[in-house]
Amino acid sequence: MQIRQEYQGYIKKKKLTIFLLCVAIAFMVVVAINVGSSNMSLMDSFLSLIGQGSEKGQQIIYRIRLPRVLGAIVAGVGLSLSGLLLQSILNNPLASPATLGVNSAAAFGANVAIIIFGIGSAQSSLPIGIGFFAFAFSMASSLAILALARANEFSRHAILLAGVAIGSFFTAGTTALQYFAEDTQIATAVFWTFGDLGRINYNELAILSLITFFAVIYSFRKKWDLNAIDMGEQTARGLGVDAKKITRNMLILSSLLTATSVAYVGMIGFVGLIAPQITRRILGTDKRFMIPASLLFGGLILLLADTLARTLIAPVILPVGAVTSFFGAPLFLYILLREKKL
């Protein structure tokens, strides 16, 4: 009886943490919608949001601020889930789209589409073609890392270093492409490479949300399989889990999430590392709670970073990718120093 009560208390604490994250995101949404250079009051923002404000206020809320806020939450959720899946299937707490070079591979794919095939322009919405190339190269990067990890039985540090090397390779490829590109092509490529939530529109937000939604649903349905894989491939097999199939599917899902994010909002680093790491230290590795909490942390972190990007040196708006990297890099070094047993 006592054990049951302790377990119920343990579960309640985790659910309370998830609830508090929901409250924090709701609070940040209110703050983010009200922050800007137009000097709108909180009441003005609220009236514009419900369609009772001035025409100018409604234009600011619905055309500028609301897509940006929703884009930050959805992209943060996707990047966090991508990092969580990579950390699970590679059994490496330092894995993420940024640290393993998946972001760089996706950016290289976008540059190939823009510079070599002439897809997209700085003034138009993002064509699907750029997302396809970003996905193809991010998938190639993920497969290369997984193949190295399996074939050579790399340690966690070795996998991380392999990811850094692959990321450097794709970064060099991007630099070479831009070096030989025309000025207009370079401008377009740089425009899409910068992490910027201000470019996303409702059509792109709908696509990003749809992909992220199905990825979240599928991942949560496989929570027990991911828990089994965390205990090792041999243990997972003993529990009847097809570890290779789960690994392959999660790898594809992670690459798709990363590629979609890069294609629509540019390079945003470290969210996929920070959110799962914070969650793991607070709630543990049980995917029943880690998945929803990590997703909420990811949305909260990116929304907070974008709000800072808009306010730190206002009216100048910083690329949100620069803000996440600025705060994420020290945390990554801290985590790296703490992983003494790797």
Image (spheres, helix red, strand yellow):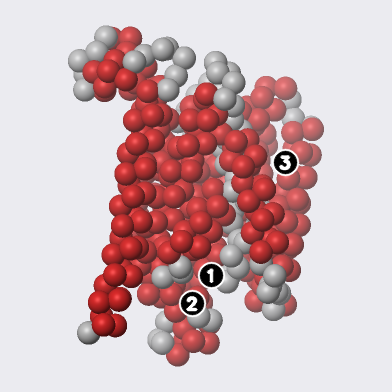
Front of the two marks 2 and 3: 2
Q: For mark 1, does the 10 Å Cα neighbourhood hold few (<14), some (14 to 19), or many (20 or more) residues? A: many
Mark in the foreground, 1 or 3: 1
Give me the C-alpha separation between circle 1 and circle 3. Answer: 28 Å
* Tag shown at residue 229: 2
Q: Quadrant of residue 59?
A: top left
* Proximity of marks 1 and 2: CB atoms separated by less than 8 Å: yes
Residue that mark 3 sits on: 174
* Residue at 54%, 48% in the rendered image: 271
Residue 276, how many percent across, how many down? 50, 58
Q: Earlier in the sequence, mark 2 or mark 3?
A: 3
Q: Inspect the image, locate mark 2, and give the three-letter code of the amino acid beneath it.
A: Ile
User: What amino acid type is highlighted by mark number 1?
Assistant: Ile
Report whether residue 126 is seen. Answer: no
Callout 3: 10 Å neighbours few (<14), some, many (20+)? Answer: many
Where residue 89 is drawn, which disc sits there? 1
Dot 2 falls on a residue whose secondary structure is helix
Disc 3 secondary structure class: helix
* Image quarter (top left, top right, bottom left or bottom right) of the N terminus: bottom left
Which is more toward the observer, 97 or 192?
97
Give the mark, 1 or 2, whose residue is nearer the N terminus: 1
**Could you tell me if the residues under marks 2 and 3 are in contact, i.e. CB atoms within 8 Å?**
no
> Residue sitting at 53 percent across and 59 percent down?
277
- Which amino acid, mark 3? Thr
Q: Position of residue 254 (x, y in %)?
A: 50, 57
| Structural distance between the alpha carbons of marks 2 and 3 | 35 Å
Residue 109 image position (x, y, % from top left): 62, 45
> Looking at the figure, which quarter contains the C terminus?
bottom right
